Image (cartoon, rainbow, N blue to C red):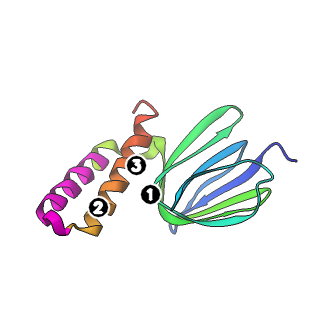
Amino acid sequence: MAETIQLEIVTPERLVVNDTAEYIEIPGKTGYLGVLPGHAPLITELAVGEISYTNAGKTKRLAVAWGFAEVLQNKVTILAETAEKAEEIDTARAEAAKKKAEAELQKAGVDGNEDAQAALDRAKARLDVAGKTGK
C-alpha cells in the first residue's frame, strides 16, 4: 500500500491544490469522512465545511462549499463550487458575509431563507478555517 495519496482540489476558476497527502478529511453530505492511501473507491457529495490533509506531518486546511469528491485507491479529486486555502481567506469579508446572512435570517423569521442559511454556513466555515491558522 502506498504511503501517500494524490489530492486535487479544483473549482470552476482554478486548480486550488495539487499535492500528496498521508491523510485527508472531507466534509461529505452525511458527515466527515477520512481517507487514507488504498481507500475503497467512492463518490460523495460535499457539504460546506473544512477539508484538511496531512503532508509530511503538517496539516493544511481549506474552506470548501458544495461539489463532489471522487476517492480512488491512489487519488482523491474534489470538484468544488468554492475552495479557499486558510491563508487566502479574507476574514473581514467573511465576517461581513456572516453578519449579512444573520440579518437576512432574522428578517425571514420562521419561514427561513435557504440562501441566507447557505451563506451563513459558508461564512462560518471560512472563519473557522481561517481561525485555525491564527489569522
Mark in the foreground, 2 or 3: 2
Residue tagged 3:
125
The C terminus lies in quadrant: top left
Please state the extent of the stretch shown in magenta in the rendering: 94-111
Q: Is residue 130 magenta?
A: no
| Residue sticking out furthest to the right | 1
* Three-letter code for the amino acid on which mark 3 is drawn: Ala
Q: Give residue 89's position: percent from left, percent from top.
A: 41, 46
Q: Distance between the residues labelled 3 and 1?
A: 7 Å
Mark 1, secondary structure of its residue: loop
Label 3, residues with CA under 10 Å away: few <14, some 14-19, many ≥20: many
Nearer to me, 105 or 31? 31
Circle 2 sits on which residue? Answer: 117
Residue under label 1, please give it: 48
Q: Main secondary structure of the magenta part?
A: helix
Q: In this view, does 22 lie above or below 70?
A: above
Disc 3 element: helix
Marks 2 and 1, the one that precedes in the sequence: 1
Q: Which residue is drawn at 29% across and 68% down?
A: 114
Picture quarter containing residue 78? bottom right
**Residue type, label 1:** Val
Residue 102: x %, y % from top left? 20, 54
